[in-house]
Amino acid sequence: MSTCTQRIVVIGHGMVAARLLDQIGRDATEHTQLGITVLGAEPHRPYNRLLLGEVLAGRTDLGGLTLPDPTIHDGITLRVCRGVTAVRIDRTARLVYADDGSVHPYDRVVFATGAEPRIPVNTSQPQGVRALRDLDDCRELLAATAHLRHVTVVGGGLLGIELACALRTRGLEVALVHRGEHLMDRQLPADAATVVRDQLSQLGIHVHTGIEDTTAHHEQDRLSSVLLSDGTEHRTDLVVASAGVQPRTALAAEAGLPVRDGIVVGDDLCSPADPSMAAIGDCAETADGCPGLLAPGWEQADRLARSLLGQPDPPARQADPMIVKLKAVGLDVLTVGETSLPMPGARTVSLHDPQGGRSVQVTVDGGRVVAAVCVGAPKVAAELTLSYERATVIPVDPALLLVPAATTAAVPISDNPTTMPSAATVCRCNGVDKKMIIDAHLAGARDLAAIAARTRATTGCGGCREVVCGLLEWMDQANPPDRDVAQPKHDGNGTGNTPFVDSPEQAQEASR
């Protein structure tokens, strides 16, 4: 390895670390000289953690969660050590020690250690109490659903509701327990949450809110029931916590770095105690705190990639639209904008129809939609999303936005790829529009994996997968492959040749 090569050790190999590696590959030049070692505690290739609930619901499979490999150019050596955990950092000697005995010298360390689930359950035994955080959790839950009957989900936020619905589709008796006064209290007003609760009840899910404590009871070494703080007792074979996460900071704290809720970093994403140490994603605490969301982690990965490459920060980009969609079987819930913050001077109109299973609330300001909540009204939700994203001028009477008649006032929506505007957003997580999908197809990306590698579409929440597949089918008809020309086979990284070193032994040898 050249003496001018910068040695980077990335601790963690989740979605944010994968984004960092991908962005480095996209921004690297012919002059780039980097030696990157990745220490990932999980034995798997990086995967889309957001879609684990979709696997439980039977709407996708485990193999479909794997993220595309990064494109790595000459001048960059990437060594990935899977199933290897960093256990100690010697900042004086600039060495990272791993649990397999390997030692990795560094010039820069990037913490991408993520977060671990909170499990707010009182129990003296761990049997039968778990979370859905990683691939192994998902596999174990899939196996458990084959022989269990009663499940309790603790946490009535976005992910908890998705999890409860997914387990219910597998024929389990499900109880959903939430500490807040109403479900999804960070996103929904109380009246909209009431509609969601009613719909969950119709699906056969027992909902309990305002529960301060959940206590698990075991008979010998087997979970038998949970006792709620309101006195209700539920028979249960399994408790699954979906009640938030806490940043993984122990390694950084042991290395002497400042830690509060997360690893403290400045605007440059580096520790104020040691500029050679950076942190991104769920484990990082910036001036804005620890948001615990994927989009800020991706933005941090993009910025740090340019910093590691010695490139200037890109121009400030407009904040991504705040759009939250519940991916739950049997429910249709969407919020846009800051639905929980007061907006002085703004006007809010609402339609609350519990018997019809719908609740819509729209906040407008300056003739534009600035926030909205839609429950059980998918057509209105689609129209309001377009109006919010494109800052469309609304009708003089904003109440018209609450009913289908508002279609004439907004940008027309079409499920037909032929009439869909080229600038129509397909993947909101990554800012991918229809034209980018078409251009990628014309360049040879003819399957979902190739599109994901080239554009990053489908690698976020997964809500765009169906639309992307539809566009690919349409393009295959409009631009059929030349049968006389061999079509390149996609290998997951966009180039067909990525110099990975996957074993700990190879990585240790290469670090010497």
Image (cartoon, rainbow, N blue to C red):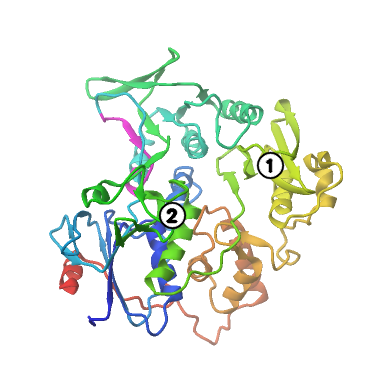
Q: Amino acid at mark 2?
A: Asn
Magenta stretch, residue numbers: 126-137
Q: Position of residue 294 (x, y in %)?
A: 47, 52
**In the image: residue 78, left or right of residue 431:** left
Q: Residue furthest right?
A: 396
Mark 2 sits on what residue?
Answer: 48
Q: Residue at 53% across / 59% down in the picture?
A: 458
Q: Residue at 70% across / 51% down in the picture?
A: 388
Q: Position of residue 470 (x, y in %)?
A: 63, 62
Front-most of residues 73 and 468: 73
Say which quadrant the N terminus sits in. Answer: bottom left
Say which quadrant the C terminus sits in. Answer: bottom left
Front-most of residues 91 and 71: 91
Q: Position of residue 389 (x, y in %)?
A: 68, 55
Mark 1 sits on what residue?
Answer: 372
Front-most of residues 95 and 135: 95
Q: Position of residue 205 (x, y in %)?
A: 52, 27
Front-most of residues 461 and 295: 295
Query: Is residue 491 visible in this depiction of the protein?
Result: no
- Which of the 4 quarters of the picture holds residue 360? top right
- Which of the 4 quarters of the picture holds residue 474? bottom right
Query: Is residue 99 visible in this depiction of the protein?
Result: yes
**In the image: residue 72, left or right of residue 199:** left
- Which of the 4 quarters of the picture holds residue 379? top right
Check disc 2 and report its element: helix, strand or loop. loop
Does 364 appear above or below 433? above
Taking the magenta stretch, the answer to whether it contains residue 128 is yes
Q: Residue furthest bottom?
A: 484
- Of mark 1 and mark 2, the one earlier in the sequence is 2
